[in-house]
Amino acid sequence: MADRRASAFAPGRVNVIGEHTDYNQGLALPFAILQGVTVHAAEHPPGPDGRPGIEALAADLGETDRFALENPSPATGWRAFVRGAVAELGDAGVPLLGARLEISGDVPRGAGLSSSAAFSVSLCLALAELASHGHHPDEELPLERIELARICSRVEHRWAGAQTGLLDQLASLYGALDTALLIDFMTLEIEPVALQLDGWHFAVADSGERHAHAASGYNERREQCARACELLGLSSLREATPDQLAGLPEPERRRATHVASENERVLQAVAALRAAEPALLGELMNASHQSLRDLFEVSTPAVEATVKRLLEAGAAGARLVGGGFGGSVLALLAPDVPTPPGAFEVSPGPGAHLIL
C-alpha cells in the first residue's frame, strides 16, 4: 500500500471590525493571523473488522479518538470537529480514506480568535487532500475555497452546536500577508484591503474568560436577528431602513440597530485605511465595541476590564472580537505605544494552505 500523506495549516483570524454581521448578510473586515492549527494525515489500513476508520491524536491535549469512517457518531469537544469533518466531507462526495491524524496548534482556544474555524478548515483540507491522492496542481486546494468554507460551517453547526456565519472560515481560507478582507456576505464577494499601517500595530489581550458559542448567548442573538427579519418581512437585516428598525420591539430593535450601524462602520474603516488614517480606525473600533456592549449586549465584566486596561495603556481603539461573552479584545496601537503587558501583537498572515 502506498504511504499516502497530507498536511494542512489553517490560521485563526482577527476581525478588525464587523461583528455579528456575517449571518445577517452584512459586511466585515477580518484578517488571518500567523497562529493556527496544523493537521498531519496519513493513510491508515482498515482494522481487524475490515472497516476503514480514523485515529486522531490531539497532541496539545494528549487525547485520542478512534471511530469508523462510515456514519461517525456524535461526540463532544475537539472530537466533535473531527467526526463532523469526516461526516460532512463524506456527504459532500469526497471519497475519504481511513487515516491517522495528528493535530496541533498555537492559536488560543476559546479566546475569540477563531480556533474552531482554524481547526475545522485544517481538518477538512488535510482529509480532502489525502483523498485526492495529490491529483491537482501544487498551488491549488483539493476543494474550492467557498465550498470548503460551507462544509466547515456545517461542521460547526451540526456537530459542535454553534450557528456561526462564514466569516471565520472565509478569513482563514482567503487570508494573505499584510492584507485584510472586505467580505460582503450577501454576495460572498471578497475584496483585499492593504493593511499598511506605518508602524501602527494590532495587539490582542485575553480577557481570561473562556467562551463557547454553543453554550453562550451567540445562538440566541442569531435567533433575535432572525426574528427581527421576520417581523419586518425581510430576508436579511441588510435590507432594513432606519425607520423600519425604529419600529421593532425590544430586544430586536437593539440587535438590528447594531448590525446596521456596524455595516456602516466597516465601510468607514476601509476608507480610513485607504486614506492612511489609523487614528480614525481606532475611533471606529471604540464605537463598534460600544455598540456590541450596549445594543448587542455580548460583553462581560471581564471583557470591559480588558478594554479599559488597553485604552489606559494608550490604545487608540479597543473592542471585543469574536462572538463575545468572553474571549479576547483587539487593540490598535500607535507606533510609539508598546504592546501592553499580557497582550501579544497580531499580524496578518497567509491563509489556509497545504504543507508540501
Image (cartoon, rainbow, N blue to C red):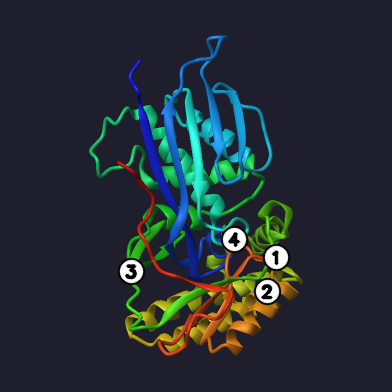
The crowding category of the residue bearing disc 3, from other C-alpha atoms within 10 Å (few below 14, some 14 to 19, many at least 20), is some
Residue 74 vs residue 252, the one in the foreground: 74
Q: Position of residue 17 (x, y in %)?
A: 50, 72
Considering only order in the chain, which callout, 4 or 1, is on the residue closer to the N terminus? Answer: 1
Q: Is residue 292 left or right of residue 169?
A: right
Q: Is residue 21 visible?
A: yes
Vertical comparison of 332 with 8: above or below: below
Mark 2, Cα crowd under 10 Å, few <14 / some 14-19 / many 20+, is many
Q: Nearer the viewer, residue 25 or 139?
A: 139
Q: Is the residue 271 above or below the residue 193 in the image?
A: below
Give the x, y percent position of residue 133.
Answer: 32, 27
Local SS, label 4: loop
As measured in the structure, the alpha-carbon distance from the residue carrying label 3 to the one carrying label 4 is 37 Å
In the image, which is nearer the foreground, mark 4 or mark 2? 2
- Asked which secondary structure carries label 2, the reply is helix
Residue type at tag 4 = Leu
Q: Earlier in the sequence, mark 4 or mark 2?
A: 4
Amino acid found under the numbered disc labelled 2: Val
Residue 48 figure quarter: top right
